[in-house]
Image (cartoon, grey):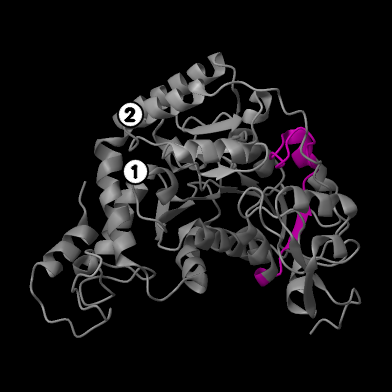
Amino acid sequence: MTTPVYDFARRYAESDSIRTHMPGHKGRPLLGCEPLDLTEIAGADELFDPAGIIAESEANASKIFGCQTLYSTEGSSLCIRAMLYLAARHAIAKCRRPVIAAARNAHKTFLTATALLDIDIVWLPQDDTNSYFESGGEQTWANCLDAPHKPTALYLTSPDYLGNIADIRAAASFCHAHDMLLLVDNAHGAYLKFLPESLHPADLGADLCCDSAHKTLPVLTGGAYLHIGNNAPEICSRYARNALSLFASTSPSYLILESLDLCNRYLSDQCTVELSGAVARVQQLKDALSSAGWMLSGSEPLKLTIRPKSCGYTGTELAEILQNDRIFAEFADPDYTVLMLSPQNPADDFTAICNVMTALPKRTPILTAPPKFPMPDRIMTPRQAILYFDTETLPVEQCIGRICAEFAVSCPPAVPIVICGERISEEAAACMQYYGIERCTVTKSSKKPCDP
């Protein structure tokens, strides 16, 4: 597998060239990586109009993933915006209003993008069995068909932050039977492609999906992929680069591009074997912890989601205990502690986690259940709440009955409890306080202004 972007940067770094272009560090090391940090000079190609080394590298990635794959140096957030833009173009081309059905575990970026693009959202009914709203099944998805405007796409987050994986194949069949696109935020699941049986959304029928390569692959933070499914409407492929460039910086990070480029070689040469070993070690760890009495949840192969209340610890307390032993968790709240593992974790990491966890004394179970998430009343669209109203920020207890104007984000990271334009109920305020949100921004008035 060739690595044209990295090879170009390495040759340039070793050429002792006089740099009269950006960046300002001129390749002189302060951090140490500066010699490889470039901009779009002659020969370096252009990310959103590639014809050289970036085009070759993306072609390598496309071969690996089995579908058209484009790079992002601004994470899955950029890819999510691009997916929604493409879904909107597809709907408008069919003379339909862009309407997307989604579960409420969608990332904040999904919400801000719908506001920017003036896309309507139909929320799927929540499942009381899961505090973070799993994506549901066919019966849940079918409820969206009764909306005043039939959705033109279904948007799922899978895997979610707690390691739950939706039935993407079933979702794709449902969507295509009802003339809808399937969009999947697969930010946590880039590695799913390389399991013995692929669980990657692009292989299961998704029209558009994104991966945060940096979350589970050996890629620098910010590296991500936008995948266009092989059976996606032609308009998605035609406008994919335009969709990315619409929201992206004109100065992409070449360090991140080099990292994505080098990862192609890793994915083609080493990943499958190393991933198999890591998955086996994670499963052994899960088995050991379950045998020791710890309650686990989620089915994602590389994610360890612990529910420590059954052993007398809160999620945040357990995370602090682990941190005292130099084990830093990905996420913790009152109910969960989440550890993300990968083939790059050596065997000693798994042993250390197991030793600390199994040595902890079991205490009286904590029976306090998390508050049920409300389905707040929608007063206006997120776009209206964000763009048209004066706002003020108040303590949460003073926001009851008011209309949310900014995303109160905490649980898990970047999944809002209340969406802009929804009324904050007592139940919603209780949820915010439970997850550590102390202040909220609300509109000063609920009277709708004229829509310009």
Q: Residue 102 location in percent, x, y?
A: 71, 50
Residue drawn at x 71%, y 49% as measured from the top left: 435
**Image: 253 above or below 288:** below
In screen coordinates, is 223 left or right of 358? left
Label 1 close to label 2 by CB (< 8 Å): no
What's the residue type where badge 2 is placed?
A: Asp
Q: Residue furthest left?
A: 15
- For residue 314, what is the image quadrant? top right
Identify residue for label 1: 64
Helix, strand or loop at label 2? It is helix
First reached walking from the N terminus: tag 1 or tag 2? 1
Residue named by callout 2: 348
Q: Is residue 185 magenta?
A: no
Label 2, residues with CA under 10 Å away: few <14, some 14-19, many ≥20: few
Amino acid type indicated by mark 1 = Ile
Q: Nearer the viewer, mark 1 or mark 2?
A: 2
Give the Cα distance between marks 1 and 2: 30 Å
Magenta range is 116-142
Q: Does residue 388 appear in this view?
A: yes
Please tell me how crowded label 1 is: few (under 14), some (14-19), or many (20+) other residues with Cα within 10 Å.
Answer: some
Q: Is residue 423 visible?
A: no
Q: Residue furthest top?
A: 291
Q: Nearer the viewer, residue 208 or 25?
A: 25
Residue 363: x, y in percent? Answer: 65, 23
